[in-house]
Structures are given as C-alpha cells and as structure tokens.
Amino acid sequence: MSITDRIDQIAKTLPVGVKLIAVSKTKPVEAIEEAYRWGQRRFGESRVQELVEKYNLLPKNIEWHMIGHLQSNKVKYIAPFVSLIHAVDSLSLLEVIDKEAEKSGRVIDCLLQFHIAKEETKFGLNCEEAAELLLNESYVRMSHIRIVGVMGMATYTENVEQIRQEFGHLREMFENLKADYFKDVPAFKELSMGMSGDYRIAVEEGSTMVRIGSSIFDVRGG
Ligand SMILES: *Cc1c(COP(=O)(O)O)cnc(C)c1O
C-alpha cells in the first residue's frame, strides 16, 4: 500500500473532531509531499533541526507540530512558525517559549506533557508538578504562550487494559485541570494521545489528536 492509501484508510477511521498529526520524523520530504497531495496539512517532527529543514523546503500552509522533547536553547529556531508544541514539561521551558514567541510577535500554543507510562525513561509532569507550574507567578504573567491541553504516551506494551488505563488517567487529569484552572478557557480542549500502535484505544478514551508515524510512512513490502 502507498502512503496515500494508508493515510486515507487511517483518516477514514477517525471520528470527526479527532485531528491526525502525521509524524514524519526521519522520513524524506518526498514522503511528506505525497501525504500533502492527499490533503494532509498537520505534520509532527521530534528534532528541531529536521523540523526547520523541512519547514524551509515545504509549502507554507503546513501546520508543524513539535512532538519531541524540546531543549530550551533550540526554541528560538522554531518559534517563528511552529503551530503547536506538544511536550512542555517544565516552567523554565515555558518561560523560554514565551520569550521567543514575543520576539516573533506570536502567541504559541503548547500542551503540558504528563508522565502516564510505567516506564522510567519517558518525560512528563505529574499532577502536583502541573499544579505548581500553573500557580506560579511567572506562568500567570506569560502573555505569548497559550496552554491548549495535555499530551502523554502510554507504556509500550501488548497489554491493552494497561494502555487503556493510562490513557484514561490522562483524560482524568485533563478534566481536572480544565475544572481547576481552565474553566473559562475554551481553547483548553486538546488531548494529544495515541500513536500507531495504540491510537484506536486512545480515541476510545477521548483523544482529540493522534500522532501517527509508522502506520502511515513505513511502507513495508507492498
Ligand atoms: C515517533 C513518535 C510518534 C509516532 O510513533 P509511531 O509509532 O511511529 O506512530 C508519536 N509521538 C511521539 C512523541 C513520537 O516521538
């Protein structure tokens, strides 16, 4: 199957209101162009340098999503154009994004990344850390970032019930944050969860944004 066939099939199975982020990291520009010709406009990358290179080469109506761990010293390269930063997990990173967004005359949308997996290696906040961030005076003063939701990655496992629980937990934290800190903020509505292996479960658990790479771009043997 071609990239076009795969993205078409996946897009058809997503409920209305669930956004598809085509994760094109490590994939060539030609692969992105094929998805673009089909009509895909949201692409996700996890490395700053690669994201900037692709931004420069490709049509300017693409929405670029930074989905990977972001280092503070690299924010300046993507601040002029990035559409959504998915993996904000510290106040200090948010401070840098706010500063660089101001320089670019923009307000940059961000998601707070939560740690929901059992694995030690994954980045992300817990409930208390998120509350601390949102109550911090420095956050309250920021005017060039907008937190529009949360993001998380489930454990890499075959255990469907565990994945479902982890996504369910993220949705609960999302709803608690909405009630406690974003009640009058309609923009706070995104739940970025689900990848190739687990997006169907994520959608059942309320995802509004799935980040799918290999199921679209890894065309193995026809
Ligand atoms: C690579 C990546 C994805 C996509 O993973 P696939 O399994 O290829 O669909 C989604 N989210 C993040 C944060 C990633 O780094």
Image (cartoon, helix red, strand yellow):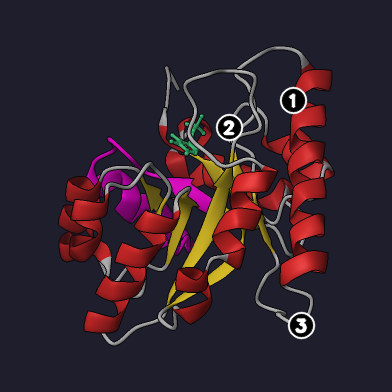
In front: 12, or 92?
92
The answer to whether marks 3 and 2 mark residues whose Cβ atoms lie closer than 8 Å is no
Which label sits in the foreground, 1 or 2? 1
Ligand 1 under 8 Å from disc 2 Cβ: yes
Task: Looking at the image, tell me whether mark 3 or mark 2 is earlier in sequence order.
Answer: 3
Q: In this rendering, does residue 133 appear at all?
A: yes
Return the x and y of residue 186 as percentages of the image width and height.
72, 79
Q: As drawn, is 45 to the left or to the right of 187?
A: left
Return the x and y of residue 193 as percentages of the image width and height.
64, 44
What is the span of residues highlighted in magenta in the rendered image? Answer: 21-43
- Secondary structure at numbered mark 3: loop
Amino acid type indicated by mark 3:
Asp
**Residue at left 41%, top 68%?**
83
Task: Looking at the image, tell me whether mark 1 or mark 2 is earlier in sequence order.
Answer: 1
**Residue at left 81%, top 57%?**
176
CA–CA distance in space, label 3 to label 2: 33 Å
Q: Would you name the residue on which mark 2 appears?
A: 196
**Residue 111 falls in image quadrant:** bottom right
Q: Would you name the residue on which mark 1 appears?
A: 163
Q: Would you name the residue on which mark 3 appears?
A: 184
